Image (cartoon, rainbow, N blue to C red):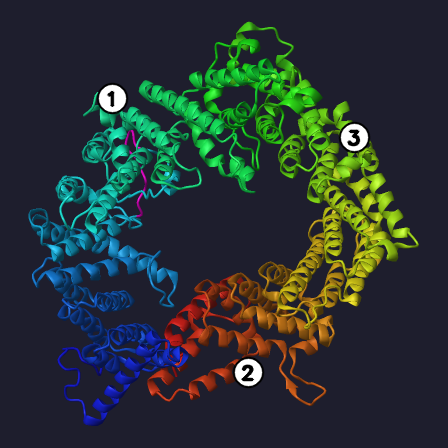
Amino acid sequence: MQGFPGGGDGGGAAAAGELAHLESTMRAIEVACTSIQMHLNPAAAEATILSLSRSPQPYKACQFILENSQVANARFQAAGAIRDAAIREWAFLTAEDRRSLVSFCLGFAMRHAGSPEGYVLAKVSSVAAQLLKRGWHDFSTAEKETFFHQIKQASLGIHGIHAQFIGINFLESLVSEFSPSTSSVMGLPREFHEQCHRSLELDYLKVFYCWTRDAALSVANKITGSDSAADEVKVCTAALRLILQILNWEFRCDSNGKKGVNVFSSGIRHDTSLSSRTECILVQPGPGWRDILISSGDIVWLLNLYTALRRKFSHEGFSIDCLIAVSARKLILQYCSLTGTIFPSDNGQLQEHHLLQLLSGIIPWIDPPDLVSKQIECGTSESEMLDGCRALLAMATVTSPTMFNQLLKSIRPFGTFTLLSTLMCEVIKVLMTKDPDEETWSWEARDILLDTWTALLMPLGSAAGIVLLPPEGVDAAATLFTYIVESELKAASASAFNDDSDSDYIYTSISAMDERLSSYALIGRAAIDFAIPLLTRHCTERFSRLHQGGGSFDPTETLEELYSLLLITGHVLADEGEGETPLVPIAIQRRFADFVEPDNNPVVILCSSIIRFAEQSLNPESRSSFFSPRLMEAIIWFLARWSQTYLMSPEESQDSSYSSKVDNMHQVQSIGSGRTVLRYFSEYDHGKTVLDIIVQVAITTFMSYPGEKFLQGLTCYQLLHALVRQKNICIHLVTLESWSKLAIAFANEKTLFMLDASHQKSLAQTLVLSASGFRDSEPANQYVRNLMGHMTTYLVEISSRNDLKRVAEQPDIILSVSCLLERLRGAASATEPRMQKSIYEMGFSILNSTLILLEVYKHESAVIYLLLKFVVEWVDGQITYLEAQETTVVIDYCMRLLQLYSSHNIGKISLSLSSSLLNDAKTEKYKDLRALLQLLSSLCSKDLVDFSSDSLEAHGTSISQVVFYGLHIVTPLISLELLKYPKLCRDYFSLLSHMLEVYPEMVGQLNKEAFSHILETLEFGLHHQDSEVVNMCLRALRALASYHYKETASGKMGLGSHASSLRNPKGELQEGIFSRFLRTTLQLLLFEDYSPDLVGAAADALFPLILCEQGLYQKLGNELIERQANQTFKSRLTNALQSLTSSNQLSCTLDRMNYQRFRKNLTNFLIEVRGFLRIV
């Protein structure tokens, strides 16, 4: 290789002309770098720099620039160009070229180690690391050892302090490159990175750790003993940072090279799900690291180093936040996270000793808590205290609660739980004095400590998910929970008259607080014997205060306190029920077992007191006095959360059918607290009464709190949805007079018609879903008819008005139509088999009316969108149940709808609009077209799931023909500009890909216009930035090509004329689909940028494309070969093309095995030729 392996002046024996050319190149790069800094013609400057990276074998010029340029940025760019060119051309560089490039980069960095331009040296070191990784499988063991010997000598300080820093910096870059999560893109398969990762872990990672540790040890004494050791501090900081990086390694092998198995010793956490908590990364090396990390004394040395540094923090040049101090603390935290097989099966003794060593050094950072917080408030940095909290979190994550508590008892008269509780109480005390909108250190400390409690209290170890805290842990939790509740009540009282709330305050109060309140609940459940009576006492006191005060005092503070209490109590009593029915918390199930009589059970007493209080909101006088909209929000939220767990529990309903008939005292006593509570609120006891109260309270929020959108939204989306989600509750709902009252009001009352439109949709869905409570379909369908009949009649009446066009634009008419459509959409979305018939009738009765409204409101985009969404919901819910004749009616209607929408070109975008109006118009059209695509997708489902008794084809209707026809109508409205909307783009290509994969035979029946549009959009999709869109297009091409190849192989037409080249009316020859996309796919794979994850899908498309157009493939291959001026390139490309279609016993049969073989062939082909093809 032509280059400068030895350094020197860079010119050496180069001829005068060559030297002049190198100097000219250097000057051009220098000018370009200066221009970018001065913002002078940056585009041209960037093009100049890019040309260096893209030019063939620019190594001599780059090395010349590195050795001779006086412009640091020019040297930086030259190093980058070496990297880009070498990675691209690696496959055809000689072994000597590869070695020389790595040696040059390492040598340059070492020779210039004292340079003040550290970013240039860091770049060169990074390039050396990347090139060493690229050739990891090419370099022999001896060659690697030669490189690493040089690095070892440098990192141990043999060549001076500056070279020592460079050696460590190189190792840091190397470890980063070999970790898959931080590796650079090289255009190589994932397997290459995995193999490099495994090899480095097995053969070198421990060696690098030892070198780095020795480097830190070599400079530590000078740092602690001198005030002028800046270079040594720099080296030590880099060493600590590298050790931290090694500990962050994704360990995958044990000491024997086998994949590690996470086997934990006694007392160590058995779950790793908590590793994602606040800045806590578990370190899980195998037993082979035990001597190096645990038994070596490194931890004691590190703690002593940091202790010495703490003494120097008051001196000039050092602070608690200096880089070396921060690096040391981060490393200490990582040692706290050690877990897994590195500890032997010795009943946790070694791990306990290890953590005790660490805790002994960390304690001064956080204890005593009051003194630490006072120092922070006086100006001391909070970073050390926060790191102490993170250390507790790490220890909590890797140990059991018992071991965690025992750690501190070895050196203090109290356990770790007591410290944790005291520390958090102090943090909360400070936090309560701060502005709640200001994220101070106490805010962050509270979150870390809450994560620590969560790590200790989340279910683990036991099959029943029970956490057994030591007695001291229970006491600590009780003390902390008491302080939390009192602090929250104090904060709520203080905020009662705060008028500085913004529009997001309500959402912040419930939604954003949920995670914090859930952590509070875990702490309360840890001391449930204490927490439930505490909450009962606080609630009872405030209920009494409201009633005793009458009108003689301002209840605002009490109401705010109740708001906070209801949220805390709701979290303690029940978990959220997103997606599933939550069970009674384990702590409540296990405790209060002695209280088998419900009237004496603390949980029953607490729940009943809150429900009775909620019932008082039904009294107009009490409602006007106490029940503000904000308090009602908390009540509704509590009832929604509580009812999902306790109200008419399905488990209790099943058991009560026989247990209620058995009078057996022993059986009753064995029920436990959880079962006692469930029994009390079951359908056989007080459940139906409570359900009736809840429904009445819900009605009150609609009738008595007009305009309270958030309150009504909570009622619709959380409370009522929670009720109808449970079938056993629906059975009783439909028998309640209060529920009938709600349904009648919804159908007839103007008050409910004034609800927010989205709330009306939700309420309609809820009311219809409740019909599943009827045991027979006929009463269920009649219920839906009664509920929705008035609305369909009203909509038909509006659409039948003679003066509709004149009055349609009136605001009250638009509002009425919009609300009706939202209600109908909500009802349609609630389709279930039992109510399917009535919902079909509901939609069928207004089909003509919707077409009339589509015509009338063609310029009212909001109404059109609601109309289309109703149709989508209705068709999607109905299509799989309909008989053939009904399906034909629905399909005919959908086609009329599509034609009408298309004929009016609703949402047509005018170029004369302003930019803001133009964007609004695009958004409106995007939403409409997405709805239409969803409609076509719903029709597709008929071919996948069909419950009808007769065949649709027997009636002369084909779903595939209908959907293709629908696409023909819709696609002209979808411009390439609109396909830039991600959701519309995905919906379109998802539908198109599905149709082409499932019904490829239909493509041959498309007319030229429709077929041409599909080709254009496939071409667009193949070059889309969203890899999922590209993947869908490749799947579509695979389906079409494989269909055509198989059909023609059996003597059939396949795609017919669409597969052939034809002349258009202008006489121009147009390629067939497979010729066109064979070129496009090869162009994409060989010359364009794409995600490596797409190679498999591209291979699956390319294989049948080649089989369909073998002649064109040979021609394209020959053209590529002939374009290569370099004989080496030409020979390699010829062999690679031959191997692509012949190696691995590839045959012309399109079966699973051949697809897999071709995938492997294509991967090897791209590795072999893509690099040099992109530069010639």
Which label number is shown at residue 925?
none
Quadrant of the rendered image containing residue 416: top left
Q: Secondary structure at mark 2?
A: helix
Are the two marked residues, 3 and 2, in contact with CB atoms closer than 8 angstroms?
A: no
How far apart are the alpha carbons under marks 3 and 2? 66 Å
- Amino acid type at circle 2 is Gly
Q: Position of residue 965 (x, y in %)?
A: 75, 65
How far apart are the alpha carbons under marks 1 and 3? 65 Å
How far apart are the alpha carbons under marks 1 and 2? 84 Å
> Which residue in the protein does label 3 denote?
776
Foreground label between 1 and 3: 1
Q: Secondary structure at mark 3?
A: loop
Q: Is residue 956 above or below residue 1101?
A: above
Foreground label between 1 and 2: 1
**Circle 1: is it few (<14), some (14-19), or many (20+) Cα within 10 Å?**
some
Q: How many marks?
A: 3
Furthest residue toward bottom: 17
- The stretch in magenta equals 259-268
- Amino acid type at circle 3 is Asp
- In this picture, residue 141 sits left or right of residue 920: left
> Which residue in the protein does label 2 denote?
1111
Q: Quadrant of the C terminus?
A: bottom left
- Residue 266 among magenta residues: yes
- Amino acid type at circle 1 is Phe
Q: Position of residue 96 (x, y in %)?
A: 21, 77
**N-term-proximal mark, 3 vs 2:** 3
> Which residue in the protein does label 1 denote?
414
Q: Is residue 655 above or below residue 459?
A: above
- Residue 585 among magenta residues: no
